[in-house]
Amino acid sequence: MRPSYSKSMPRCKRRSARTIAGGRLQGVFSRMSQALIFGGFLWLLVFYCVRVAAGEHSIDGGGIYYNVSKDLDDTHGEYLRVYFDASTSDAFTFDITRLDRFDDEGTQFTVGNIHQFSERWFTQLSVAGSAGGFFWPDVRVDGSVSRRWFNDKRLVTTLGGGYFDAKDVHEDLRAYVDAAYYFERPFVLQGGFQINISDPGSVDSTSGYVAASYVRKKSRIVSIRGGIGDQAYQAITATNFVVDFPYHSVRATWREWVGKTWGINIAAEHYSSEVYDQNGFELGFFKEF
């Protein structure tokens, strides 16, 4: 049945509605095309890595949705992540995340490396950039050095830092310490503390977290993490941001092997501050090679 229109509705109104609907569909198809291109690129990358390097390799992909309070637009997007072992001492990660957030849209690209210097010492380094999205950084660099302690190497401590060059007027420098203890399987306890200095204004902030995990590799990994602290800068539009406010957050993740080399990822998160509250989830799949 064809839809009926009120006689009082001018013909141009009907064209406008069709134009808007067509524009929305075009935007959906554009995002789907981008996701397919990114996904195809990462699948080819994994296929190449599997052929040239022996070891553990995986690809993760999924969707993101968060409900945001204070009349701010909800957040939604997609992610694709690749992990592969290039050698016995080096592993690499690639991450592409697209978000529609705060009425803007953009994609972040991250490349990372994990290098094993010995059985006890290893480092992590990642570099990120973005296209679009005022909430993404122009450049982000993170690095850390970790050590395994005692004969059983169950205690791992980490010292790290990072640089965040935002697309607004501010930039961040941070330093953090982290410790994790791996009990007789399957439990892990973890905690950390971070200091952040933001400019302009030399606004300092501190935060900390604790986490607990149940780890059964090739079966199930479940984690819960709680964080609390202060946030120095939070951009909510391209020209408007809030400075120096407290927050707290809780995040739970579940990685379940459905088959021998594939499964599902589920994450749920609650974030609360005087600027806004955010509640949502991520749902995806992973495949190991």
Image (cartoon, rainbow, N blue to C red):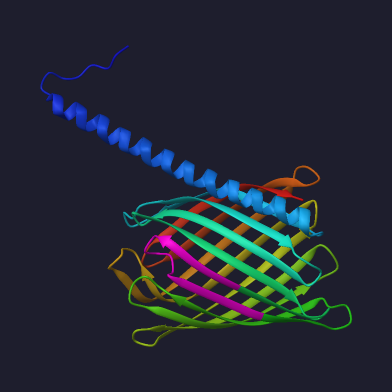
In the rendered view, tell whether residue 175 sits above or below residue 128: below
Q: Position of residue 83 (x, y in %)?
A: 69, 59
In the rendered view, tell whether residue 42 sits above or below residue 275: above
Q: Residue at x 81, y 62 (%)?
A: 186
Q: Taken as a whole, is the magenta stretch helix, strand or loop?
A: strand
Q: Nearer the viewer, residue 131 or 5?
A: 131
Q: Residue at x 41, y 40 (%)?
A: 28
Count the numbered circles shown.
Answer: 0
Q: Which residues are magenta?
A: 126-144
Left or right: where 107 falls relative to 287: left
Q: Nearer the viewer, residue 132 or 278?
A: 132
Q: Single out the residue that lies furthest toward the top.
A: 1
Q: Quadrant of residue 6?
A: top left
Q: Single out the residue that lies furthest toward the right.
A: 151
Q: Nearer the viewer, residue 4 or 93?
A: 93
Left or right: where 71 falls relative to 188: left
Left or right: where 174 falls relative to 30: right
Q: Is residue 102 magenta?
A: no
Q: Single out the residue that lies furthest toward the bottom.
A: 202
Q: Is residue 134 magenta?
A: yes
Q: Quadrant of residue 127?
A: bottom right
Q: Residue at x 71, y 50 (%)?
A: 47
Q: Position of residue 277 (x, y in %)?
A: 42, 60
Q: Residue at x 71, y 80 (%)?
A: 146
Q: Position of residue 111 (x, y in %)?
A: 59, 66
Figure quadrant of the N terminus: top left
